[in-house]
Image (spheres, rainbow, N blue to C red):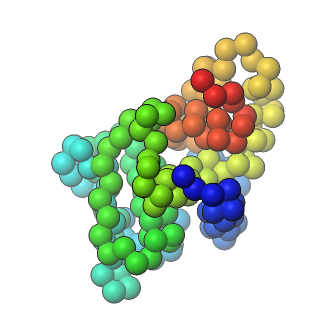
């Protein structure tokens, strides 16, 4: 579990990056941000159970993404690996295995939870998300499933990632 103060710091860090690269509309060009931060992003086939990897050698940081996975998974993995690179600078090698987004699959490893928080904050910036939710009177819809799908498409993330983000920001009641 991550403390509230750490979550606030991670969200602030992601917001600083978004401001630095003048991101004002979704979807966030996460690959561009990673490359501007000096990370090499390589997409290629990896074993199906791996979504990505982070490799650090001196000043070089390489993010490997499984090109066999869908676009939203690849985008989340880039953001997640950026989180590891920026939040956990002492790790030289990190492998990320594919997990489904279910409550039982929430990471118990603090560094994984932090990288997930960073990725969600980077790909689905709170201010941009709140603007779109408020525009649509989302919270009063009788069945928000269609709107979740629309938001996920707008931000180019999976429906599951969007659902968790909305719950974490208290914009959608927990199931």
Q: In which quarter of the image is residue 43?
A: bottom left
16 in relation to 162, above or below: below
Q: Is residue 59 left or right of residue 86?
A: left
48 in relation to 42, above or below: above
Q: Which quadrant is home to the C terminus? A: top right
Q: Quadrant of residue 92?
A: bottom left
Q: Work out which residue is located at the far top of the displayed protein and give it.
A: 142
39 in relation to 12, above or below: below
72 in relation to 102, above or below: below
The answer to whether residue 145 is seen in the rendering is: yes
Indicate the position of residue 45 as horizontal and vertical percent values. 21, 51
Q: Residue at x 32, y 64 (%)?
A: 94
Q: Nearer the viewer, residue 115 or 67?
A: 115
Indicate the position of residue 114 as horizontal and vertical percent values. 52, 58
Q: Work out which residue is located at the far bottom of the displayed protein and give it.
A: 58
Please state the total of marks drawn on the protein image.
0
Q: Which residue is drawn at 72% across and 37% down?
A: 170
Q: Nearer the viewer, residue 113 or 132?
A: 113
Indicate the position of residue 66 as horizontal and vertical percent values. 28, 51
Indicate the position of residue 1 as horizontal and vertical percent values. 54, 52
Q: Which residue is drawn at 42% across and 61% down?
A: 81
The answer to whether residue 79 is seen in the rendering is: no
Q: Is residue 15 left or right of residue 48?
A: right
């Amino acid at each position: 579990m991550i403390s509230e103060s750490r979550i606030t710091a991670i969200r602030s860090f992601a917001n600083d990056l978004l401001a630095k690269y003048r991101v004002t509309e979704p979807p966030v060009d996460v690959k561009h941000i990673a490359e501007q931060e000096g990370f090499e992003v390589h997409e290629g086939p990896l074993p199906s159970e791996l979504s990505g990897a982070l490799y650090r050698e001196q000043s070089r940081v390489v993010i490997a993404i499984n090109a066999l996975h869908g676009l939203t998974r690849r985008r989340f993995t880039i953001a997640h690996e950026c989180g590891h690179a920026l939040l956990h600078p002492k790790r030289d090698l990190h492998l990320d295995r594919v997990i489904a987004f279910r409550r039982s699959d929430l990471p118990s490893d603090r560094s994984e939870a932090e990288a997930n928080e960073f990725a969600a904050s980077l790909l689905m910036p709170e201010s941009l998300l709140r603007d779109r939710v408020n525009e649509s009177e989302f919270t009063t819809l009788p069945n928000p499933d269609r709107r979740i799908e629309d938001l996920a498409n707008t931000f180019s993330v999976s429906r599951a990632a969007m659902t968790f983000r909305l719950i974490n920001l208290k914009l959608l009641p927990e199931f």
